[in-house]
Amino acid sequence: MQDVNTLFFNNSICDEELDGRISLDSMIKGIDSFARLANATCFVIDFDSHRMLYQSDKMLYLDGIADNQRQRESENPYWSFVDEETLNNLLLIRNRYPLVGQTIDIENYQTHICTIDYPIIIRRCKFFINQKFTPLVMRSDGITKIGLFIISPSTCDHIESFIITQSHIRYRFDFKEGAYKTFDLDASLSTQEKLILQRVQKGLTIEDIAEDLNLSVSTIKTHRMRIFKKLQVRTMPEALTVIGNYHLL
């Protein structure tokens, strides 16, 4: 098995310090404010020093977990609770991830989101989480120095990874080929289905949506079932989770 430290870039020195517009301290304070407002699980890792620079008070599934219950040491606290097979798959994804940066323009690379769904094991119970990552500080050679992670529940029952650029180009990790491939994730959602999901986000009922879109309730229910099938979910809350995790609207 590869050493878990191969997850992180090493032997690298930051060529450029943070500019005068923002300090690391103020950046962390901003992230902490966001974590409190959103009641979100966030942490920040410095890949050069292999250090956790910040983690929010709320840590989904990990609150109350003692250090002696961890399976392994890792800068990413959630990687401490994955099994060996999952760890190897995550390392494979991590090793292939930098290659995508060579294929997209610098603006998209600096603002992209990498999202991974994977299982963790806590007290013999398996939970799937969604881990979103985006660069905060990049070195002059284009490699991420400091990155922000956000953790949320996942609706997946398998490992899945996407890279989503600011221009909405998406790359999906293909485990057979061991590489990220371009993938049109939202092409399967029709315009009507997106309109329905937008209204569900606003809290409208089926009856409200039918009236708003001038459609029958049965038509809305038919669209809802198609949405469930396409997103591989069973409920609207799960559908909204997928929509949020993969930026489909």
Image (cartoon, grey):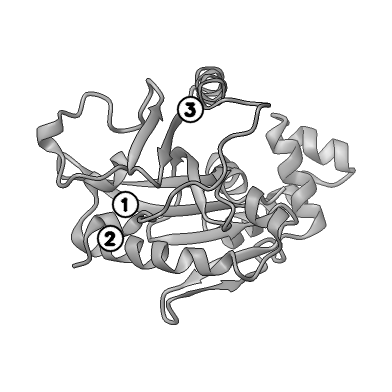
Give the label on residue 73, or none: none
> In the structure shown, which secondary structural element does the residue marked by tag 2 occupy?
helix
Most extreme residue toward the left, as rendered? 68
Q: Which residue is mark 2?
A: 86
In the rendered view, does 153 fall on the left or right side of 142?
left
Q: At 48% across and 27% down in the image, what residue appears?
A: 40
Q: At 55% across and 18% down in the image, what residue appears?
A: 33
For marks 3 and 1, give the CA distance. 19 Å
Give the label on residue 40, or none: 3
Nearer to us in this view, 85 or 147: 147
Any part of residue 235 in sight: no
Considering only vertical position in the picture, is 137 above or below 20?
below
Residue type indicated by callout 1: Pro
Considering only vertical position in the picture, is 244 above or below 5?
above
Residue type indicated by callout 2: Thr
Nearer to us in this view, 149 or 64: 149
* Residue 226 screen position, x and y as percent: 65, 59
Quadrant in which the N terminus is drawn: bottom left
Q: Which residue is mark 1?
A: 119
Question: How many dots with numbers?
Answer: 3
In the rendered view, does 40 fall on the left or right side of 136?
left
> In the structure shown, which secondary structural element does the residue marked by tag 3 occupy?
loop
* Residue 95 screen position, x and y as percent: 40, 66
Residue type indicated by callout 3: Ala
Tag 3 near tag 2, CB within 8 Å: no
Tag 2 near tag 1, CB within 8 Å: yes
* Residue 204 screen position, x and y as percent: 73, 31
For marks 2 and 1, give the CA distance. 7 Å
Of the residues under marks 3 and 2, which one precedes in the sequence? Answer: 3
Tell me the quarter of the picture where residue 213 sits: top right
> In the structure shown, which secondary structural element does the residue marked by tag 1 occupy?
strand
Q: At 71% across and 44% down in the image, what residue appears?
A: 197
